[in-house]
Image (cartoon, grey):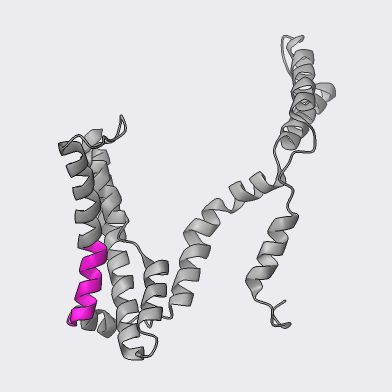
Amino acid sequence: MLKSGVHPTVAGIAIALTVPARPKMSSGKLLDKAKSIISSMQKKNKVDVLGSRRDHEKILEARDVAERASTPLRRWEDALDLPVVLFVLPLFALVNAGVVISFSSFTESLQRPIGLGIISGLFIGKLIGISGACWLGQRFNIGRLPGNVNIKHVICVSLIAGIGVTMSTFIAAVGFDAQPEQLLMTKTSILFASILSAILGVLYLRLVSANKT
């Protein structure tokens, strides 16, 4: 796919379209099969998986029924969830951002109006905007938070919402397409603001959780 000139994402989409999204058996047949296996095991006072070959086969049969009750699409989703969130997605964002990570670029971003504006918008703007909107909504009875959620949780979400690498970088690339120096500055500022939001968001979440316990 890569050598043919077709974008690699097309291969991913093609593979995803071939993954079955329905179970092999209907829900009625699956339930009947599971009930019969459980009923046969309940007739015995004890299930000896190690000593009884038949009990072992019943357990394996129950496992196969549970496997057929799910779908390959759901199993792939569960298996790939953590690797994608913790490794693939951050790596994708950093590689496509094209940011040259260096101490000098970070310090320079704190000295330029563009850098300070981006950092303030992502970090302080999200904090004030989300938390302030929720507080005003409660104050004037426009809306209310769910049962177990309070304003401290909203502040935590507001801090984490400052993580904005992908869309912010895309907008910066469009806005500063003909200005490579400004584009590098904006990308560095976005990365700095995202890291700052992530660190303070996690620390605040741990603080709120510790006070709750």
Answer with left or right where residue 110 lies relative to residue 146: left
Can I make out residue 23 in this image? Answer: yes
Answer with left or right where residue 204 lies relative to residue 55: left
Q: Residue at x 40, y 79 (%)?
A: 174
Residue 57, given in percent of the width and then of the height, sits at 82, 27
Residue placed most toward the observer, 33 or 45:
33
Query: Which quarter of the figure is the N terminus placed in?
Result: bottom right
Q: Is residue 20 above or below residue 119?
A: above
Query: Which quarter of the figure is the C terminus placed in?
Result: top left
Hey, which quadrant is residue 75 in on the image?
Answer: top right
Residue placed most toward the observer, 144 or 164:
144
Can I make out residue 204 in this image? Answer: no
Q: Is residue 76 magenta?
A: no
Q: Residue at x 59, y 53 (%)?
A: 80
Q: Residue at x 23, y 44 (%)?
A: 134
Residue 188, given in percent of the width and then of the height, sits at 32, 78
Q: Is residue 121 magenta?
A: yes
Q: Is residue 119 above or below residue 135?
A: below
Answer with left or right where residue 120 lies relative to residue 72: left
| Magenta span of residues | 111-123
Residue 195, given in percent of the width and then of the height, sits at 31, 65
Q: Residue at x 75, y 56 (%)?
A: 18
Q: How many marks?
A: 0
Hey, which quadrant is residue 6 in on the image?
Answer: bottom right
Q: Is residue 59 above or below residue 203?
A: above
Residue 172, given in percent of the width and then of the height, sits at 36, 77
Classified by dominant secondary structure, the portion drawn in magenta counts as helix
